[in-house]
Image (cartoon, rainbow, N blue to C red):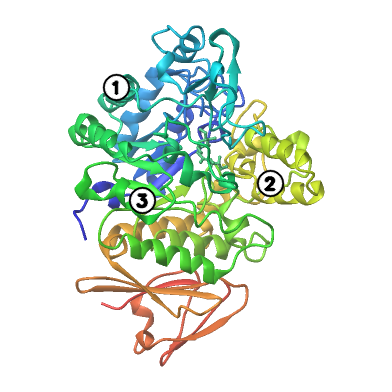
Amino acid sequence: QSNKSWWKEGILYQIYLQSFKDTDGDGFGDLNGVVEKLDYLKSIGITMVWITPFLESPMVDNGYDVSDYKAIHPRYGTMEDFDRMIYGLHEREIKFVLDMVVNHSSDQHKWFKGASSSRDNEYYDYYHWWPAEKGEPPYRHSLFDPEGGWDYVEAVDAYYLHTFTGNQPDLNWENPKVRQEVYDIMKFWAEKGVDGFRMDAFQFVSKDTTWPEFPEGHEKDYVKWYGLRPELHGYLNEMYNKIIGKYNVFAVAEGTGSTFEDAHNLVDSDRNELQMAYHFDAVNLSQTPKGYSLLDFKGVFSKWDNAFSEKGWLAIYLSNHDNARLVSRFGNDSDDFRTVSTQLLNTFLMSMRGTPYLYYGDEIGMTNIDMPNIEEYTDIEAQGKYQSALKAGADMEEFINTLNYNSRENGRTPMQWDASENAGFTTGDPWRRVNPNYTEINVAKQKTDPNSVLSHFKRMTEVRKKNPVLVYGDYTLLLPEHEQVYAFARELDEDKILVLLNFSESESEIELVELQGLTSEKVVIDNYEGTAVEGTCITLRPYQAILFSLG
Ligand code: TEU
């Protein structure tokens, strides 16, 4: 195993700022809300915080469209609020990760305003253009725009490329000036004390600017065709030398390209490029209400662990601001099993090799919100998908059912702090409806209950921190064919931990030689009480998650 690092040992908590805590009554969460909750963050045991974008933006994609990379959007606060927040985090030994959205800028950024005004403008080459005199541009798929990835601008008589909405033009990474701008932005924030960078939509940067036609059907495999040109590695080296190494920060890429080779080339430590990446294979497993198969789930995590066992480092996650809620997709959000199944998932995330990325609200088991009407969706992605489905003549009832299940808006509802109006999130009108189950599921209620999701979460962060074997240890899958139980061992020198997770609402009896002689003293953490091992057998209760020390 390669060198130890604080960012490998950390437990990251992602905050969707707009929905976390509002302190000025405008219905949007803000930086002061994080300041107000600093002690809460410390109390749950997390050690790193990543906050979704809060920079100046016209908010077409809730801040993933930045118009000034060095200014805070007034909705979220001021630079002084930011300074106070990062100071408060550091005071509590919590690191701060900034979301760097530099695959694209906003079309309201001064670079794009200049670029789209004249071909002679100094910023013209900051973006990708297809001059109209060459005819129609070769088709490029857009993830958010059913009309495709090129938009025409009359003033320059050319089309610009946008992988996301038309208001998010892709930056031209082949231009050294653009890269220098990116490093300047990173330097600015590193000097403000930022400890890490999350590189948004990173697998799309560095395109083939000869703009070849892509083969039929490439839209279904756009990651393979759209970015990660070999030149990128040189650029990342440059970034490492100018920023990452110099300021002792780390960078994590959203996305890993389409092969293990791509993924490795991004994060192998000897290459001095990025430090960590997260793949989409696991979250892609459960996209419809039909759910997923545990065998596939084990397959994905085992395959990725295996590919990174020698070198490189992964983020481990099952939910974030681009996904529906953890328990609703990967657990069981019924009244009977919500608590235990969230506990199981949190146990899993913190027992794997890789840095756990935990999403706000999952520490209390927040669930999907029921939104069966398209009118209620404010997200640009949902609206784009809806238009595409209409255009394709899809079964719209099925479309809405699926959207209601997998939409990322499910994961963006206000944090449920207590049972007071609006869940204690705001005194004003929340920007997005609070999940009506907040009277049942909230922090205040769970704080005092030793069996709650929250209390278990705190115990689990302790366990993770006390056991380096869970961070660095080798991973061995056990019972690979079992359809309900995910069992694996982690091993580092003398330390060995057995992880048993029953991903099912029925009891599951399993047999493992490792269980021989285990008594309750060997239990590291368990979401049930009084577990009895008999010989080499154990009967796991519904969604039971238990760790035994074998050392
Ligand atoms: O997402 C990049 C990305 O690859 C998207 O396809 C993402 O998987 C999709 O939104 C899933 O719902 C990043 C951000 O995480 C996302 O929130 C932004 O909307 C997007 O970039 C554009 O900046």
Disc 2 residue type (three-letter)? Ile
Mark 3, residue position: 263
Comparing 204 with 403, the one in front is 204
In the displayed structure image, the side of residue 434 where residue 140 appears, left or right: left
The residue at the point 59 percent across, 57 percent down is 327
Disc 3 residue type (three-letter)? Ala
The residue at the point 57 percent across, 40 percent down is 415
Give yes or no for contact between labels 3 and 2 (Cβ–Cβ under 8 Å).
no
Residue neighbourhood size for the residue with mark 1, other residues' Cα within 10 Å, grouped as few (<14), some (14–19), many (≥20): some
Mark 2, residue position: 369
* Secondary structure of residue under mark 1: helix
Percent from the top left, x then y, of residue 495? 24, 72
- Count the marks: 3
* Secondary structure of residue under mark 3: helix
What is the C-alpha distance between the residues marked 1 and 2? 42 Å
In the displayed structure image, the side of residue 130 where residue 488 appears, left or right: left
Does residue 521 appear anywhere in the picture?
A: yes
Disc 1 residue type (three-letter)? Gln
Return the disc, 1 or 2, that comes first in the chain's sequence.
1
Find the residue positioned furthest to the bottom.
Answer: 535
Q: Quadrant of residue 40?
A: top left
Q: Is residue 514 above or below residue 314?
A: below
Percent from the top left, x then y, of residue 53? 47, 29
Mark 1, residue position: 180
What is the C-alpha distance between the residues marked 3 and 2? 34 Å
Comparing 64 with 342, the one in front is 64
Does residue 71 appear anywhere in the picture?
A: no
